[in-house]
Image: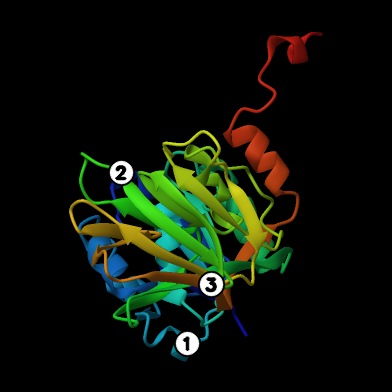
């Protein structure tokens, strides 16, 4: 029985549309059945790719009815995070095709697409689970999950937040800062890294707490066990703050606390043979780019 491949793109421009066309040809020639996310299909129409070219259209509610083997996310890491949100706890493995810039999650470059499709056809890949974070605000008025991070940020430009943090019921500290990033190992190369947090291999089992522009030199990023429950109370001059969970953003009343913990479900990521996290970090961040390393 032929494999079923799901296609997803968060925002499609001309370069991504060309990748979709290339993918459709490769997948069809190898006998895959192809389904496409409904909004993605609508965006592809403007580039001449009609829904009649797919074996079916899906959304977050009915994707499991098609039982896809893999979902291909076409775009950058933002598209990959959108795909993860779409998949939720359904367990469909995701492979990211990179049309963006950095691409830690969407790490298949355009020249490697054909090799990636061959690997899928030949079952020559691994599926690696990535831990996610569950979050809630107040009495669960807002809740969800995040693959990269959950971040508390100030809602105005003028003043710092006062952020009180408890870990498993134990008071940790009070941050005077622009915000606090609670990150998975997967998200360690995203906002946490920009805020000065460490890079963590994705198979580690921990959560990072990284303050954003702390107004105290003694505050440093901290790693805690992945099963920890983090509770956050915020004080703000404006009376409100912002919670960002991957690409979702909510404005919240300072009276409402944020709780972050390990989610029950993981996101399954497709890892191609011969591709590893350490190569990706070295190449994407240009580690070791020193003229002394290039001497003949």
x 27%, y 61%: residue? 44
**Residue 108 higher or lower than 93, as above or below:** above
Precedes in sequence: disc 1 or disc 2: 1
Which residue carries the number 3 mark?
261
Residue 224 versus residue 40: which sits nearer the camera?
Answer: 224
Q: Position of residue 102 (x, y in %)?
A: 49, 40
Residue 261 versus residue 285: which sits nearer the camera?
Answer: 261
Q: Secondary structure at mark 2?
A: loop
User: Badge 1: few (under 14), some or many (20 or more) residues near its Cα, within 10 Å?
Assistant: some
Pointer 1 with pointer 2, Cβ within 8 A: no
x 72%, y 49%: residue? 276
| Residue 169 can be seen in this image | yes
Q: Secondary structure at mark 3?
A: strand
Which residue carries the number 1 mark?
64
Residue 124 versus residue 212: which sits nearer the camera?
Answer: 212
Q: CA distance from mark 1 to mark 2?
A: 45 Å
Q: Position of residue 277 (x, y in %)?
A: 69, 48
Q: In front of the other: label 3 or label 1?
A: 3
Precedes in sequence: disc 2 or disc 3: 2
x 24%, y 61%: residue? 43
| Residue 22 can be seen in this image | no
Q: Position of residue 92 (x, y in %)?
A: 55, 77
Which residue carries the number 2 mark?
160
């Amino acid at each position: 029985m032929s494999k079923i491949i799901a296609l997803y793109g968060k925002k499609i421009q001309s370069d991504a549309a060309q990748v979709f066309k290339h993918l459709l040809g490769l997948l069809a020639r190898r006998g895959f059945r192809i389904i496409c996310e409904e909004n993605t299909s609508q965006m592809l129409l403007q580039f001449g790719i009609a829904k009649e070219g797919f074996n079916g259209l899906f959304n977050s509610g009915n994707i499991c009815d098609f039982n896809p083997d893999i979902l291909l996310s076409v775009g950058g890491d933002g598209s990959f995070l959108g795909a993860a949100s779409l998949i939720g706890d359904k367990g469909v493995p995701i492979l990211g095709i990179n049309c963006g810039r950095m691409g830690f999650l969407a790490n298949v470059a355009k020249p490697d697409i054909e090799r990636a499709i061959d690997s899928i056809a030949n079952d020559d890949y691994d599926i690696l689970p990535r831990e996610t974070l569950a979050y809630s605000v107040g009495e669960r008025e807002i809740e969800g999950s995040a693959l990269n991070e959950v971040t508390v940020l100030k809602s105005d430009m003028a003043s710092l937040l006062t952020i009180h943090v408890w870990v498993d019921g134990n008071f940790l500290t009070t941050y005077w800062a622009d915000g606090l990033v609670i990150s998975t190992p997967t998200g360690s190369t995203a906002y946490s890294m920009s805020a000065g947090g460490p890079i963590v291999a994705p198979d580690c089992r921990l959560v990072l707490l990284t303050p954003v522009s702390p107004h105290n030199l003694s505050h440093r990023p901290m790693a805690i066990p992945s099963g920890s429950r983090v509770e956050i109370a915020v004080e703000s001059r404006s009376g409100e703050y912002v919670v960002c969970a991957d690409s979702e953003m909510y404005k919240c009343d300072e009276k409402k606390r944020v709780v972050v913990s390990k989610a029950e479900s993981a996101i399954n990521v497709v890892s191609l043979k011969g591709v590893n996290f350490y190569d990706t970090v070295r190449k994407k961040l240009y580690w070791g780019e020193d003229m002394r390393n290039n001497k003949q």
